[in-house]
Amino acid sequence: MALLFASFSMGTRFEILLEGEESAHPRAAGEAALAEIEELDRRLSFFRRDSLVSRLNRSAALAPERVDRDTFELFAEALKVARDSRGAFDIALGGLLAARRAGEPAPAEWPGSSAIELDARASTVFFTDPRVALDLGAIAKGHALDLAGRALREAGVTRALLHGGTSSVLALGGPWPIALERAEGQRVELCDAALSVSAAHGRRFPDGGGHVVDPRTGRSAADERLVAVVGARARQADAWSTALLVDPDPGLAPPDLGIALASGPRALRTISIHGAGRAAFVPSPLVA
Amino acid sequence: MTHTDRRRFLRTGAAFSAAALLPDLALPAAPRLGEPLSIGLIGAGRQGRAILAELAKFPDVKVAALCDVSAARLASGLRRAEGAQGLADHRALLDLPEIEAVVVATPSHLHREPALAAIAAGKHVYCEGPLATTESDAAAIAAAARAASTIFQTGMQARSNPIYLLARSFVASGAIRDVVSMRAQHHRKSSWRLPAADPAEEAALNWQLDGSVSLGLVGEFGVHQLDAVHWFLGSYPSSVSGSGAVLCYPDGRSVADTVHASFDFGRGRVLAYAATLGSSAEGTHELFTGTMGTVKLGWTAGWMFKEADAPTQGWEVYANRQGFGNEQGITLIADATKLAAQNKLKEGVGLPEPPLYFALADFLRSIREAKPVACSAEEGLRAATVAIAAHRAISSGERIAIEVPGSRAR
């Protein structure tokens, strides 16, 4: 027996597939997981006026703002990835991204997430530069999947597949086989693990650039790259797949992540696999 | 007209009209010097946790303690209240002398005991709606609140919602002229069932689906919309009829997942209500249809539709509009004055904070600045009375007469 739940959140389609008859009311478990995703969308959306992120963008430069523990831990992880990736990943790009979306020239310079101060004891966020604007797009889907997965586990579910926009995937139980588009014949098998794929596709800015931007230069990441990251948690995989698309140096990433980097104009010709991660990247015999 | 010219045009036009007609968004009071207000939360379920998220935004408020009979819910709540004490029993919470105000967010049929205990302990109380699920419980709470010198606010969020305040002023000033019809709906696609990690908890957790304690969709969701209608019209229905069924989720529940109700407000005016858990189409909204226009309110946004022969006010020329099929709705913007001054009138359609934030802000203002309570226990009692009658009508299929305590048809 399989149940499918879907929601349009964070500008994309999330789906949750539950298999098996583990609980008396599997529908309730799936809905609780969707509710986490939808609530996160309301809380973290850059585009909603009444979101926590919009509130922080208005007020966190004036005085430290309290946030709940889950949100605090999200920010803490994002700042760590920003530091470890040498700035290839950054959640403070709201101003820059808004300019690119509007087809306006990028500002001459902009603050990064080093201007974000976190106080763990008070659970507060403070911006030391008023130009900071949070845009959590590069990590929000993964975070949503992690919280949805947590809700499913709390409801006793042990086998499920969740994804957001098909680029962020979380597997409970497994193995769940996932095919990678644009990487002919490449498959990933996930078992209690997350996969995030970053590539320049779909939405583009008015100037034609891809939507993943290098926080250090303001320019879009190269079109022919694809990065797939596998790890225990979706938000970590999300953040690092974005960072590695900008700066494809797998040595920067934590050693327990599985990383596949690929490049080439059309179907990917060169794929190099780093780290064991928690999944097997199964190369097709057609790939040289 | 150049880009700059248009902005200047909009700014002067809108600022004039906004100053003349639209109430400024009342911002919460600036942080007071001295001790923060200490608040206790009774009930850390979904609504309790939503309340914690909003209270965190007030720098001069500290959630000192929360309580819940479930350890799992309590732990979940504590993740949203840094430094708060976690307790299992509301009596222990009420014994804490530093707590000045209490929010009651227990299941609706369990409001009475903590609400009365909190009032008796001399605390200010914000009680979630519906006030209670029986007439006697609601009356007892209202009587205790009336006799107390502390603040009591019922959590009927429409009365604090800046968009609803704005719309009500339009209706009161005659902008839509005579109201001939009202509609309200609550549509969502969800079974409304919560997962229980422990099967023994399942029944208690899903009290909303239990017909022996729950007022169902009209009591849990409709009551807030009913209160908005009472507030706009200044009157209450004299009878209600309805029907309901389990159409989508035959999982053993004894509460309808789809209901309809018709409320008679006298002199031919009827409120048609529909609620379902089987569809999200057009969400949750209320419609007031008048001879010169219609107001549509959707909690985080609102619109006014003018009849073709309605006189045009000057300010409408500059107002933002949104298309709905062939109709054009004037968007009701909550803080037009401020946005116009910042040349941001095009952005920011919709509330800057969730509706719950404004209701809690009003509660805090009532405590600190003696602002009149946004929704009194009395109005909570009236809304609950109407909702209880509606649930009875839906369950029985009979038309039920409504006796609203202390009301006069106006």
Image (tube, rainbow, N blue to C red):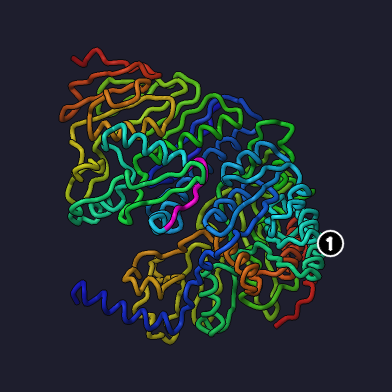
Task: Name which residue lies at 77% across and 47% down.
Answer: B92
Q: Is residue B71 above or below residue B226?
A: above
Q: Is residue B175 above or below residue A70?
A: below
In magenta stretch: residue B291: no
Q: Quadrant of the N terminus of chain B?
A: bottom left
Q: Circle 1 sits on which residue?
A: B136
- Horizontal side of B4 relative to B199 (left or right) equals left
- Horizontal side of B137 relative to B226 (left or right) equals right
Residue B129 x/y as whole percent: 68, 59
Q: Is residue B42 above or below residue B249?
A: below
Please tell me which residue lies in front, B53 or A279: B53
Task: Name which residue lies at 41% across and 65% down.
Answer: B349
Q: Quadrant of the C terminus of chain B?
A: bottom right
Chain of the residue that carries numbered disc 1 in the rendered image:
B
Q: Quadrant of residue A74?
A: top left
Residue B101 x/y as whole percent: 68, 59
Residue A31 visible from this viewpoint: yes
Residue B360 x/y as whole percent: 60, 62
Name the kind of residue labelled 1 in the image. Answer: Ser
Residue B240 visible from this viewpoint: no
Please tell me which residue lies in front, B65 or B250: B65
Task: Name which residue lies at 42% across and 82% down.
Answer: B19
Task: Name which residue lies at 53% across and 38% down.
Answer: A33
Q: Is residue A204 above or below residue A26?
A: below
Please tell me which residue lies in front, B333 or A69: A69
In magenta stretch: residue A66: yes
What element does badge 1 sit on? Answer: helix
What crowding class fits label 1: few (fewer than 14 Cα within 10 Å), some (14-19), or many (20 or more)? Answer: few
Residue A107 x/y as whole percent: 20, 54
Please state the extent of the stretch shown in magenta in the rendering.
A63-71
